[in-house]
Image (cartoon, helix red, strand yellow):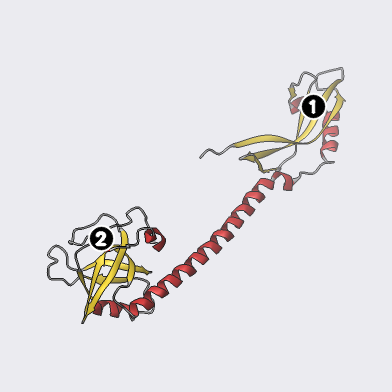
């Protein structure tokens, strides 16, 4: 990203004066400007106005140094300078515009974030309610720590699980073949496009999970996600939490 920053002379007033410089005997015509140093940032006035200065140019446009001013010229410049004030609002308008834009953005972002959090809380509440009334055929969104064979997975891919059946203290599930591996954060919207519609879209292997652990987690009022612990005896490579439920259909 490129930022354009520049310093310039903001002209407060200008007039033509006839004066004699030091070490000169004849008067000459000059252009007198009263200026204040100012700044621009990305094309907007962005500060300045801390001091008023004089700029004296001869008829050829040459800048005359203040050390060459005569006493009479200094007095005239002082009187001319006192007639004009620095327009601070005009010089700092860009800063005010940017500040207002940031405040507006912050308000919009805050409202959007609040609405997003409210929606997320609603989704979490629905998920918890569904898990408390666990039924065969329910679908949930989840992130996976291992594949169905217990092998480690890079990142935390998201996908679907389906409750196949519940027998005693065991939940039998299937996971979707397709996963979302591109999203950094879990969102039901990210996996909605590949919600399994047929048997072929689910993994063939049935995985056994601990129902007691699920129930224990649901007792915590602050629960926003639920870990599922694999308890199948055939899981030689990995026996532990293999996925986390984060949303429900």
- Please determine whether, in this image, residue 236 is positioned above or below residue 33: below
Q: Position of residue 196 (x, y in %)?
A: 32, 62
Rendering quarter of residue 245: bottom left
Q: Is residue 205 above or below residue 15?
A: below
Circles 1 and 2, Cβ within 8 Å, touching? The answer is: no
The crowding category of the residue bearing disc 1, from other C-alpha atoms within 10 Å (few below 14, some 14 to 19, many at least 20), is some
Tell me if mark 2 has few (under 14), some (14-19) or many (20+) residues whose alpha carbon lies within 10 angstroms of its own: few
Viewer-side residue, 167 vs 14: 167
Q: Is residue 168 above or below residue 208?
A: below
Residue 221, image quadrant: bottom left
Q: Nearer the viewer, mark 1 or mark 2?
A: 2
Quadrant in which the C terminus is drawn: bottom left
Compared to residue 166, the image places residue 1 above or below, namely: above
Spatial CA span between label 1 and label 2: 94 Å
Comes first in the chain, label 1 or label 2: 1
Q: For the image shown, how many numbered marks are present on the structure?
A: 2
Task: Please report the residue visible at 47 percent of the width from the left and 67 percent of the height from the top.
Answer: 117
Residue 127 shown left or right of residue 44 in the figure? left
Residue 148 on image: x %, y %: 20, 62
Residue 60 spot, x, y in % from top left: 77, 18
Which secondary structure, mark 2? Answer: helix
* Residue at 64% from the left image edge and 35% from the top image edge: 7
What residue did someone put label 2 on?
Answer: 200
In this rendering, position of residue 229 left or right of residue 233? right
Nearest the eye: 7 or 108:
108
What secondary structure is found at the residue carrying circle 1?
loop
Specify the quadrant of the image occupied by residue 162: bottom left
Give the label on residue 69, or none: 1
* Res 140 label: none
Q: Residue at x 67, y 34 (%)?
A: 8
What percent of the width, then of the height, locates residue 59?
A: 80, 20
């Amino acid at each position: 990203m490129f930022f354009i920053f520049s310093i310039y002379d903001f002209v407060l007033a200008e007039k033509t004066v006839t004066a004699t410089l030091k070490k000169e005997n004849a008067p000459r015509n000059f252009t007198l400007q009263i200026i204040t140093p100012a700044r621009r940032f990305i094309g907007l006035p962005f500060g300045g106005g801390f001091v008023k200065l004089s700029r004296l140019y001869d008829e050829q446009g040459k800048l005359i140094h203040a050390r060459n001013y005569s006493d009479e010229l200094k007095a005239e410049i002082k009187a001319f300078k006192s007639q004009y004030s620095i327009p601070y609002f005009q010089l700092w308008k860009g800063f005010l515009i940017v500040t207002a834009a940031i405040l507006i953005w912050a308000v919009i972002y805050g409202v959007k974030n609040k609405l997003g959090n409210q929606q997320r809380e609603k989704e979490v509440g629905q998920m918890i309610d569904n898990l408390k009334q666990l039924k065969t055929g329910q679908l949930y969104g989840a992130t996976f720590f291992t594949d169905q064979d217990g092998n480690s997975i890079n990142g935390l891919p998201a996908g679907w699980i389906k409750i196949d059946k519940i027998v005693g203290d065991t939940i039998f599930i299937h996971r979707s073949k397709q996963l979302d591996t591109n999203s950094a954060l879990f969102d039901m919207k990210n996996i909605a496009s590949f919600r399994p519609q047929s048997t072929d879209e689910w993994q063939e292997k049935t995985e056994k999970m601990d129902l007691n652990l699920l129930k224990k987690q649901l007792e915590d009022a602050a629960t926003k996600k639920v870990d599922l612990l694999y308890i199948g005896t055939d899981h030689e490579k990995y026996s532990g939490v293999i996925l986390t439920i984060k949303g429900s259909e």
